[in-house]
Amino acid sequence: MRKVMIVLLLLAAHSGRSQEQEAIWAEKYKGENAVTTTHKQHLEVKLEEGSVKAYLQVEKEILLLTDIAPGIHRSGSVYHNSFGKLKNVEGYTLVPGKKGYEKLKVKDFKEVKSKSAGVFFDDDRETILSFPGLVKGAKTVLKYELEYTDLHFLPSHYFQTYMPTIWSGFSVTVPKDVKLNWQLHGQNTGKIKQSVEDSKNKTTYTWVAERIGKYNYYEDAPDMSYYLPHLLVYIDSYKPGKDESPKKVFGTVTDLHNFYYGFIKDLNAKPDEHLKKLVADITKDAAGDRAKAEKIYQWVQSNIKYVAFEDGMGGFIPREANVVCQRKYGDCKDMSSALVAMCREAGLKAHYTWIGTRAKPYKYHDTPLPVTDNHMICAIDIDGRFIFMDGTDQHIPFGVPPYALQGKEALIHIGKGQYKVLPVPVISGHENLAVDSTYLSLTGKGLAGRVSMSVKGYGAWRLDGTMQYRSAKEREDVVKAITSRGSNKYIQKDFDYNVSSDNTVHAYSSFEIPDYAQQVGKEWYINLNLQRSYQDQWIDVKDRTVPQEYSYKNMDRQVVTLEIPKGYHVSYLPPSFESGSDKLWKCKMSYVQAGKLVRLIKEFEMNTLYIEPAQFEENNKLVEGLRKQYQESIILTAD
């Protein structure tokens, strides 16, 4: 116990710094509003009456460096739920003075329901503190303790945040009868120092990082867990009693599957007459297994409203399929339950399936923990080929995974102790094709024209989802946004929008673009690059170390046709251009004349979901070459 206390004292020792040290930091981090001087967490794991409990002590200290910092950091928050129950919380402000710091305790605490995006009901709570007496040079201190009663859900620790951090540390103390394991993820994990301290009955593991810069946020980057350095700790096994054998918790995919199996082993065990009749009605005209599955999938899409529930273990346990089908609402695991039960009722091989969206960077064999996934779907085996069905997306057709699941691993339940880990396919760009055709003519004021667009694949389904609940005026605005071209003087005269039976989206409009073409003497200069795709694809490589992410691979074909006015001929056509990479993206451009028409044909192909930092320079060279081509104009000369 004495050694453990020494370790904890060492963790805390750095916090007793002088105002002189704070002045040094203020100079070093000039330009920042604040800096985290201390972020430490200590997790104490205990065996209590044969079960594992854990208690987390957290301390966070922030130094305010500017006059506007008090307004930004006037409050602090503690997030807690049934997995991490708040035991106590304390906050205070350290206000600088001539004789040191004056301590002003927080008196204003308020507990509210935490706002989780897209979640209808959960048990997440937020305790908000208001720090008193904030001025430039003050420090806010937040301390709290959480109790974890389920050993499957232990806290993680991120060493890097949205502001610079002087010192960040995480420590875990476990009894000898508890085997701990851990993983470090993200970038720059080599800068995290680890130490181990053994005592007679306990072991303390400590991870510390110092002088960590703030992270740079990019809207087009993967989730921050892909690159921010962070620590995951988990229980491998423990001995409930002195003479008992160790109980396995986590460490392999089998362990994780066994844990999840407990949530579904008794699910939909009893036959239900309502469900049986429903499935019979839905599939009565279906010829073959694939047709049956498609009918069931479409019924769930159309009739079960997605409502997210994350209430403790209720966020993991699916509800009975008959309940979901009669209520007509449920979350992802409820829809998984309905799809599996309905497909099995129709004689199909259907399986409960866990999966992480692309917001999760982990893989099952590398990180066999609940943190690896955040979603539940259904997988059906038709003629030895698995098809993934996600009922939460109303617009994705049967046989295609939502774009957020592309490339991710799926944990497919086969039976007790049996499972498969399979990748979800990435849909090729050819399946996500957009064709844009523009017909132009010169007028006395500029250009007049009409545009016809057809979009297939993810782009079409997203666009149709956007249009579904829009008014006529809002639809007009959306069509204008996607067909606008040439300049900000674009005027949409009329429009049309429809979806064909194969889920292709079609948009049409006629338009004018005043002052677009330039006449010099007997010559017209017309740049047919009314759309300049990939022009803004250039990536600032100075400080960026994280990939650029795309929702899906795609292809674009753009054709611009100009009617040559009577009395004119083409005196200059720009040369053809081709550039790109199979690993990044490609571009082809060509100009052709056919009688009294001139056409510019452009084709783009995005071949990846991620442009990695090592590919940034190659990407930028492609963009620079394309930008030069966009400066080219055709020349029409009077006869």
Image: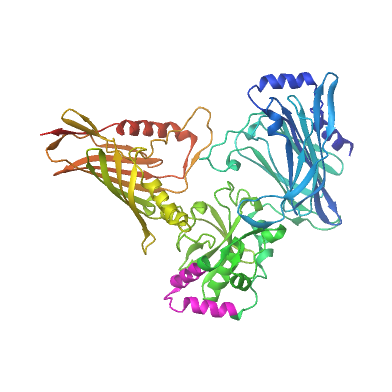
Left or right of 592: which side holds 630? right
Residue drawn at x 53%, y 63% is 391
Q: Of residues 333 and 496, which is closer to you in this image?
A: 496
- On the image, which quarter does residue 285 sit in? bottom left
> Which residues make up the magenta segment?
274-299
Percent position of residue 623, x then y: 38, 33
Percent position of residue 262, x then y: 69, 64
Left or right of 164: which side holds 456? left
Q: Main secondary structure of the magenta part?
A: helix
Residue drawn at x 84%, y 52% is 47
Q: Of residues 114 and 237, which is closer to you in this image?
A: 114
* Magenta region includes residue 336: no
User: How many discs appear?
Assistant: 0
Percent position of residue 233, x then y: 71, 45
Q: How is the image coloured?
A: rainbow
Residue drawn at x 87%, y 56% is 49
- On the image, which quarter does residue 7 sit in? top right
Left or right of 334: which side holds 585? left
Percent position of residue 444, x then y: 22, 38
Residue drawn at x 80%, y 26% is 95
Q: Of residues 196 and 349, which is closer to you in this image?
A: 349
* Magenta region includes residue 281: yes
User: Is residue 210 something one can see in this rendering?
Assistant: no
Query: Which quarter of the figure is the N terminus placed in?
Result: top right
- On the image, which quarter does residue 630 sit in? top left
User: Is residue 613 something one can see in this rendering?
Assistant: yes
